[in-house]
Amino acid sequence: TSNKPYNLKSLAKATKTTVEQLNHAMLSFLDKGLVICKEFPSKANGREGKKLYWATTVTLSDNNGDNDTNSKKKQKKGSDGAIQKELSKLLATPSEIKEMNELHTTLEQRYKRIQEELQPLLQIPTMKELDDAIDAEEQKLKGLEEEID
């Protein structure tokens, strides 16, 4: 994790999801102590302030500290084990990652095959294009007939 703050809009763009979905997730993450939020009030009246989110970090010193300090932290923030358990629910297993990579590769190959099949079909003129070409040719024919007469 990095100490870089994110607003929901930039995070949504980076993760290719919507701001609404992230807002819902952030509420849950805030409750569980996985992220920290700081709101900066807007200088303009009527505008919503800017909210920045940081991921909280659990360090080894937090886990291996003396019992009095560690128990106070657990009472204040919730147990580190609970945070790690919540994080493990959110992270994909290596087998899931491998499976999704294989699925991604398969879908990319299928997409390329469909694109190749679609190219000749896209070169066939549409009915509108055919009608426009017929109209243009009929106009030419009328012009030639008028020249002959």
Image (cartoon, rainbow, N blue to C red):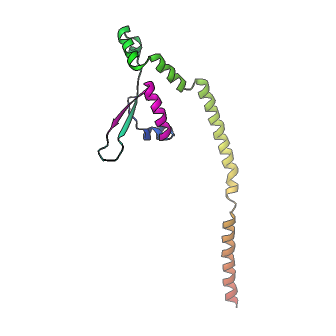
The residue closer to the viewer here, 36 or 107, is 36
Residue 66 seen from this side: no
In the orientation shown, which residue stands out farthest toward the front? 46
Q: Magenta residues, as a range?
A: 19-41
Residue 40 seen from this side: yes
- Residue at (56%, 26%) from the top-left corner? 92
Total labels: the figure holds 0
| Residue 133 position in % (x across, y down) | 67, 71
- Residue at (40%, 35%) from the top-left corner? 6
Q: Is residue 106 above or below residue 146?
A: above
Q: Is residue 55 above or below residue 135?
A: above
The residue closer to the viewer here, 37 or 76, is 76
- Residue at (68%, 49%) from the top-left corner? 116
| Residue 102 position in % (x across, y down) | 64, 32
Occupied quadrant, residue 78: top left
The residue closer to the viewer here, 9 or 71, is 71
